[in-house]
């Protein structure tokens, strides 16, 4: 089933953009977002970038064990988040979606609790850091094996279609995921069943150290949609409004029963793949610097400036309030205290087996002895 939006052509050779580098609107239609929404998108982008910086500090000071930086992906994720009907649509994110999670309203205290494994973590410390999930937000917990959430998201979308509630599903991943069998199985099934799902590929050109040329022989990722009977859109992922409008049209089409779509957003990750990676081995400083020139945050700021929606005073206030919000969330997440290791043994079986009980007792006793040793 091929769907189309009224505003955008699928399979274009050039990425769809609505704001150019100078911040000038270049769309063929008028932007209909109200001023508050336009400013809120900017706030979310700045908040996500600042959270990213704080997470790096927390990891470097041993408070968190792992970080997957989002910087450079903010426009893609915030644009998409604002196209969702939050708490109605279903979200299947991946580990780099910090800005998406923030923009759909994942509380910062839960975010930092998850990153540090404290009692503020609704997953009770059982996930690797950077693996969010939220029942309230209908945000499926991130799964580490690349692409493994794609067939699950499609199954969920098919279930929504059968239930007839008019809900859409968003499923995100990096371009590396498109080389996994799960990805192809998922897209094939979505196309065959007309599932109400939009697949969003955040193409930052690297899967850890593997660059795009070694990832695929395709001219781009969007073109792969042809094979699955759905439209594919190539979008400038550094342009938050292009990301927003394309996602808005496609999620709406999915809710209206017009079937799935694939969107490729061209982004760049400014940081290393994760806190366990050294990117100097596989990309040059010049390349990173060139992409920094295209940073989605100042570009969007220029747009807001040109429309008279932003100024230095607002910028100062925003930076101060974002800093204070993050300080408060980190403090609250830490104050919640570390997750007790005994929680490892809970919530798996309705009544633990005798063996599990014995293991738990031995484990708790060993921990206690180790703690006493430490205090001697
Ligand atoms: C099935 C599987 N293979 C390998 C890995 C190790 N791994 C973790 S992240 C990653 C790169 C994924 O790159 P991409 O999908 O492009 O997303 P990005 O990290 O660039 O945003 C790899 C290979 C994994 N988690 N799962």
Image (spheres, rainbow, N blue to C red):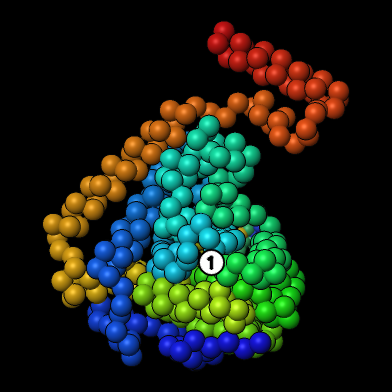
Residue drawn at the location 70% of the way across and 31% of the way down: 346
Q: Which residue is mark 1?
A: 282
221 with respect to 56 (left or right): right
Residue drawn at the location 78% of the way across and 32% of the way down: 350
Quadrant in the rendering for residue 3: bottom right
Question: Can the viewer see residue 337?
Answer: yes
- Residue 264 point in image, percent of width and height: 53, 77
Ligand 1 appears in which quadrant? bottom right
Please state, as top left, top right, bottom left or bottom right, where the N terminus lies in the image: bottom right
128 with respect to 284 (left or right): right
Q: Where 216 falls versus 37 (above or below)?
A: below
Q: Where 81 falls versus 184 (above or below)?
A: above
- Residue 6 point in image, percent of width and height: 46, 89
Residue drawn at the location 52% of the way across and 70% of the way down: 202
- Residue 210 point in image, percent of width and height: 60, 69
Front one among 297 and 137: 137
């Amino acid at each position: 089933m091929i769907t189309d939006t009224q505003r955008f052509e699928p399979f274009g050779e050039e990425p769809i953009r609505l704001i150019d580098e100078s911040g000038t609107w270049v769309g063929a239609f008028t932007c209909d977002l109200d001023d508050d929404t336009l400013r809120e998108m900017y706030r979310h982008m700045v908040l996500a970038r600042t959270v990213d910086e704080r997470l790096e500090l927390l990891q470097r000071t041993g408070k968190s064990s792992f970080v997957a930086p989002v910087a450079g992906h903010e426009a893609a994720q915030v644009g998409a988040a604002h196209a969702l009907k939050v708490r109605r649509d279903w979200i299947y994110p991946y580990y780099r979606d910090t800005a998406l999670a923030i923009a759909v309203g994942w509380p910062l205290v839960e975010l930092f609790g998850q990153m540090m494994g404290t009692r503020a973590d609704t997953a009770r410390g059982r996930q690797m850091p950077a693996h969010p999930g939220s029942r309230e937000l209908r945000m499926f917990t991130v799964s580490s094996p690349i692409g493994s959430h794609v067939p699950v998201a499609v199954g969920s979308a098919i279930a929504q279609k059968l239930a007839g509630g008019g809900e859409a599903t968003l499923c995100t991943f990096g371009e590396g995921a498109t080389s996994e069998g799960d990805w192809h199985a998922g897209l094939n099934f979505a196309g065959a069943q007309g599932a109400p799902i939009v697949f969003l590929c955040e193409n930052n050109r690297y899967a850890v150290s593997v660059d795009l040329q070694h990832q695929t022989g395709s001219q781009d990722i969007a073109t792969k949609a042809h094979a699955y009977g759905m439209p594919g859109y190539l979008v400038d992922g550094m342009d938050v409004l292009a990301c927003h409008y394309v996602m808005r049209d496609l999620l709406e089409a999915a809710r209206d029963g017009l079937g799935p779509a694939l969107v490729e957003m061209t982004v760049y990750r400014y940081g290393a793949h994760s806190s366990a990676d050294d990117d100097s081995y596989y990309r040059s400083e010049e390349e990173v610097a060139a992409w920094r020139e295209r940073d989605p945050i100042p570009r969007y700021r220029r747009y807001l400036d040109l429309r008279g929606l932003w100024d230095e005073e607002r910028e100062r206030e925003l930076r101060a309030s974002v800093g204070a919000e993050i300080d408060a969330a980190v403090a609250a997440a830490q104050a919640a205290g570390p997750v007790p290791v005994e929680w490892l043994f809970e919530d798996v079986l309705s009544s633990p087996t005798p063996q599990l009980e014995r293991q738990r007792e031995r484990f708790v006793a060993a921990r206690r002895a180790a703690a006493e040793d430490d205090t001697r």
